[in-house]
Image: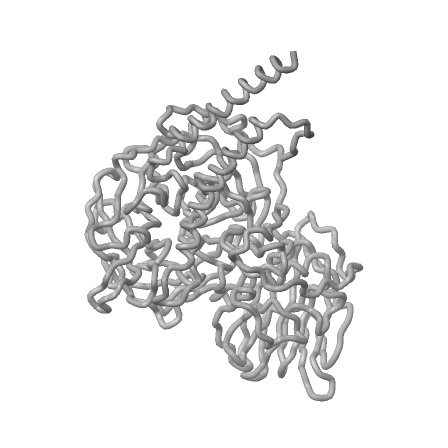
Amino acid sequence: MKSSSFTKKFGIKLRILAAVLILTTVGSGLCLSIHAEDTSMKKVTSLFPRLYGAWVGDVMPMTDGDQLRLYYLYDLDANSWPMHPFFSFTTDNFYEYYYQDNVGVYGSTNPADQDHLGLGTGSVILGKDGLYHCFYTGVNTLLEGQTTAIMHATSPDQITWTKIPEDTIYPPEGYNKEDYRDSEVMWCEEAGEYWMTVSGRCVTEATGTEQGVVLLYTSDDLKNWEFKGNLFEPNHQYMLECSDILRIGDRYYLFYSWNCITYYAVSDSIYGPYTDPADNVLSSDSFTFYAAKAGTLNGKNYLCAWLGRKRNMKDSGIYDWGGNLVVFEIHQKADGTLALDMPTTYYEYFNKTYGFVPVRQTGNVTQAGNSLTLRQDAASGNAYVSMGLLPETMMMTCTVTVDHYFTQGGLAFGSNGVNGDSMYIMINAQNSRVQFDGNTIDNAGASVAERVGSKVGFRFEPGKEYTLKVVVENEIIALYINGEKTAVNRVYCAEGMDWGFFASNKGITFSDIEIKVTDAVTTQPGDESEKEDQGITGEPIDPDDDDDVIIMPPPGGEDTDAPTTDAPASTTEPANDTTAEPPQSDTQEGEPNTGGCRSLLKFGTAAVMAAGLVLAGVLLICKKRKKPPMTP
């Protein structure tokens, strides 16, 4: 009986395994109809949203009626293939985001398909035929000579997607076969046709070497595309990832990303030539605002990207690929250059006044109402003001004035009281920038590993007033500097600890300080932290070490009473654990694409690991052991 029972169970397991192997091998060759269990809309209330246990990769905005739909590459700490489907949030206010579980565009499970190992960045557009058209990067390192290609899928409702393999576009002759991705499709009013820009590499006439370029294709029907050549070739970047064109007034702005930074170029004509302004970096570097693309809602323009996460939630860690969604509002300055600022809807989100109550001070500090002047001097050293326990979320607005070109001061976080053990975000007039070094005030200037901190350039002149807005949500702290530049970072030690102001060189004044919170905040003005100082723990994390990972809890919660939709059940492919597109490299100009190579290796490694798991399953089934079952 035991032998018969085992044989029966063994046979069932083998049949299940065989089915798994068939599905793995045949993949999209089968006509799969997967019905989502829940197609209702769910809500995340957050300024910097992501789904629980997951991360936001490259963002692809699309105006969708009276909302902005933000497609993105869905990323996990532990990914399996096919990686990173397109998921999406929708919002009309940038603090309430709606989504549907497991609804998106997925890669193929068939090893012979171009998108077998995963999806890379692309775009979605509503065509004149009434269908939604998704153009995305199909990645398959198993296919010799065609690692990447641009692929096409359509949908009547953005829930059920039909792929059109015959529309796949491969790199033109003379272009790199691996660095070819990031399709952005738009209707070009000036030309009366659809345009598609693609990021690629080719030998340029100006340099005689391979350089990053933006290719241009045109079409009348979103199906048949004609290659027109290079739209943009600045000849100073290895790659120009996630290109996107935005028109404001009579100027055209082309955004692109590389070296962990989002850049932009400008032209008087959509046809170019596009040139980089002298200062074409609007937000902080080091994967804190990367792969940004533009979206338009209610006449306003927004730049949408992601803030990278840090391994094991350590401030000493390195910013990695993918994290939380970040949205900035775009403004055009009088000279035609661009500026970034906080979305104006944040003012309605922070609806509760929070009292201005300094609780401790050290050194040369003067208070006048809601204003503070802090000055470092030889007699008393650094100056500090503690504002007590940092609220879970808040918006602080003020005016900043420095009294010297060498002034260094700013905001302090992550300690009991504010002192030399606090971590800083510095207004550094001496070096014309705002910076976060992942370091304490006492250790300011000490060497840290690349991408532990970030910076953005800004010139401060003594005696001149600059507006400063600071938004906090859990460990994420965003600065909006004079309505021109932005800097967003993770300060993990800030949560549950005190915060305040400091001056470590010369003097700085914060005037008309006003603090707002939401109704959900329980912290009271004057409260102080009761936690022990955490300090900066651990060594910088190796970005190639995939063993040292912890999933961070979500920044926002779900509302069970979110509005529902009558959308039909999804017929997309099943939701494998998927990730964002290949990590963009932080290599310098002209260097080999080590980041891209790492990402392709990860694609290949995932496939090998999956095959190993299947083999391990066969061995486990075939061994008749009396051991308790393993828990997942």
Vertical placement of residue 122 versus 564, above or below = below
**Is 271 on the left or on the right of 344, as rendered?**
left
Residue 424 visible: yes
**Is 24 on the left or on the right of 39, as rendered?**
left
Whole-percent x, y for residue 434 in the image:
54, 71
**Figure quadrant of residue 212:** bottom left
Vertical placement of residue 464 versus 523, above or below = below
Count of labels in the image: 0
Residue at 72%, 81% in the rendered image: 364
Vertical placement of residue 40 versus 7, above or below = below
* The C terminus - image quarter: top right
Foreground: 483 or 43?
Answer: 43
Whole-percent x, y for residue 325 in the image:
51, 50
**Figure quadrant of residue 541:** bottom right
Q: How is the image coloured?
A: one colour
Foreground: 614 or 440?
Answer: 614
Residue 527 visible: no
In the picture as drawn, the residue positioned furthest to the top comes out as: 1
Foreground: 100 or 483?
Answer: 100
Residue at 40%, 67% in the rendered image: 588
Foreground: 617 or 365?
Answer: 617
**Figure quadrant of residue 222:** top left
* The N terminus - image quarter: top right
**Is 121 on the left or on the right of 206, as rendered?**
right
Whole-percent x, y for residue 479 in the image:
56, 63
Whole-percent x, y for residue 42 in the image:
56, 35
Vertical placement of residue 102 versus 479, above or below = above
**Is 125 on the left or on the right of 202, as rendered?**
right
In the picture as drawn, the residue positioned furthest to the bottom comes out as: 378
